[in-house]
Image (spheres, helix red, strand yellow):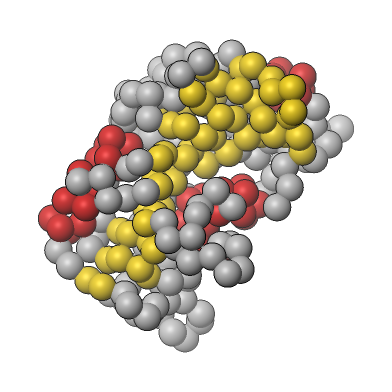
C-alpha cells in the first residue's frame, strides 16, 4: 500500500513555523500562498507582494473580496491594519535592497546545492519569471515548498537541475510532502520525515544525495 503523503495545507503549516515574529515575507505561487493561513498564534508576519503591497492579511472571507487585493495566485486577501500600497518598482526595490527576510517559493526542481528551478517547463515550452529571480537573489532566506516527486514519480530534489535555473545556491530549506531538508555549505541534510516514513524510504524517493541527521525526527506542527 502506498505511503501517506502530507497534504499541501500541511506543507504550508510546516513552512509557517519557520517564519519569525516581525519577518517581511514574500509568498510565491502554489503551496506558498497557503502559508498566510497558518501563522502560529501570537506571531506577526508582514507579507510583501511584487504588485506593491506590504502587510496584507490572510485570504479574505466569502463576501469580503476586493478585486484589487489579490496574492500571487490571484486569491483574494483580507485587509490588515497598517497595510500599505506602492508602485511595483518600489516593491522590487525592496527585494533588491535586501528588505525581504524570507521568500517562500514553489519549485520544479531543487538541487542538492540549493539551486532553484521554478520558472520554465521546457517540455511544455511555457514559463513565467515573475519576481522569482529577484526574490531568489535578494531575499535573506529562501524556502522551497513543493511535492517531493512530480506527476511521473520523478524526484524534484535532484543532484543537478535539468530545468532552466532561476538562481544558484539560494535555497536553504526544502519542505515537501514527505520530508524536510536543510541545505548548507556541506550539502543537503534530511532532518525530518513525514509520519509513517523512514529515512531510508525518503532516500529511495530522492535523486539528490542527502546526509541523514543523527537527530532526524517526524514532522510535527
Report whether 21 appears left or right of 204.
left
Q: Is residue 148 above or below residue 221?
A: above
Task: Look at the image and tell me in which quarter the N terminus lies.
Answer: top right
**Place of residue 168 in the rendered image (x, y in percent of width and height, measured from the top left):** 34, 24
Residue 63 in view in this figure: yes
Residue shown at the point (37%, 49%) measured from the top left? 101
Report whether 120 appears left or right of 193.
left
Q: Is residue 49 above or below residue 185?
A: below
* Res 81 quadrant in image: bottom left
Report whether 146 appears left or right of 47.
right
Residue shown at the point (64%, 16%) measured from the top left? 211
**Place of residue 36 in the rendered image (x, y in percent of width and height, measured from the top left):** 50, 62
Number of marks in picture = 0
Q: Is residue 168 above or below residue 179?
A: above
Q: Is residue 89 above or below residue 122?
A: below
Q: Which one is in front, 14 or 149?
A: 14
Residue shown at the point (69%, 20%) measured from the top left? 212
**Place of residue 98 in the rendered image (x, y in percent of width and height, measured from the top left):** 25, 45
**Place of residue 105 in the rendered image (x, y in percent of width and height, measured from the top left):** 42, 43
Report whether 221 appears left or right of 165.
right
Question: Which residue appears farthest toward the right when viewing the image?
Answer: 1
Residue shown at the point (17%, 67%) measured from the top left? 86
Question: Which residue appears farthest toward the bottom when viewing the image?
Answer: 63
* Res 153 quadrant in image: top right
Residue 154 in view in this figure: no
Q: Which one is in front, 221 or 166?
A: 221
Amino acid at each position: 500500500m502506498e505511503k501517506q503523503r502530507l497534504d499541501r495545507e500541511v506543507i504550508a503549516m510546516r513552512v509557517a513555523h519557520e517564519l519569525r515574529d516581525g519577518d517581511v515575507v514574500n509568498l510565491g505561487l502554489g503551496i506558498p500562498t497557503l502559508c498566510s493561513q497558518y501563522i502560529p498564534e501570537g506571531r506577526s508576519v508582514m507579507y510583501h507582494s511584487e504588485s506593491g503591497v506590504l502587510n496584507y492579511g490572510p485570504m479574505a472571507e466569502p463576501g469580503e473580496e476586493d478585486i484589487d487585493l489579490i496574492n500571487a495566485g490571484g486569491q483574494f486577501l483580507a485587509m490588515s491594519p497598517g497595510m500599505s500600497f506602492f508602485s511595483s518598482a518600489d516593491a522590487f526595490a525592496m527585494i533588491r535592497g535586501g528588505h525581504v527576510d524570507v521568500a517562500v517559493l514553489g519549485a520544479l526542481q531543487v538541487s542538492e546545492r540549493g539551486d532553484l528551478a521554478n520558472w520554465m517547463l521546457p517540455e511544455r515550452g511555457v514559463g513565467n519569471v515573475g519576481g522569482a529571480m529577484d526574490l531568489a537573489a535578494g531575499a535573506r532566506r529562501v524556502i522551497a515548498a513543493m511535492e517531493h516527486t512530480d506527476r511521473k514519480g520523478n524526484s524534484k530534489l535532484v543532484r543537478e537541475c535539468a530545468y532552466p535555473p532561476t538562481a544558484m545556491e539560494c535555497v536553504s530549506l526544502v519542505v515537501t510532502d514527505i520530508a524536510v531538508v536543510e541545505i548548507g555549505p556541506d550539502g543537503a541534510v534530511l532532518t525530518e520525515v513525514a509520519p509513517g516514513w523512514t529515512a531510508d524510504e525518503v532516500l529511495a524517493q530522492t535523486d539528490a544525495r542527502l546526509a541523514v541527521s543523527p537527530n532526524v525526527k517526524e514532522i510535527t506542527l
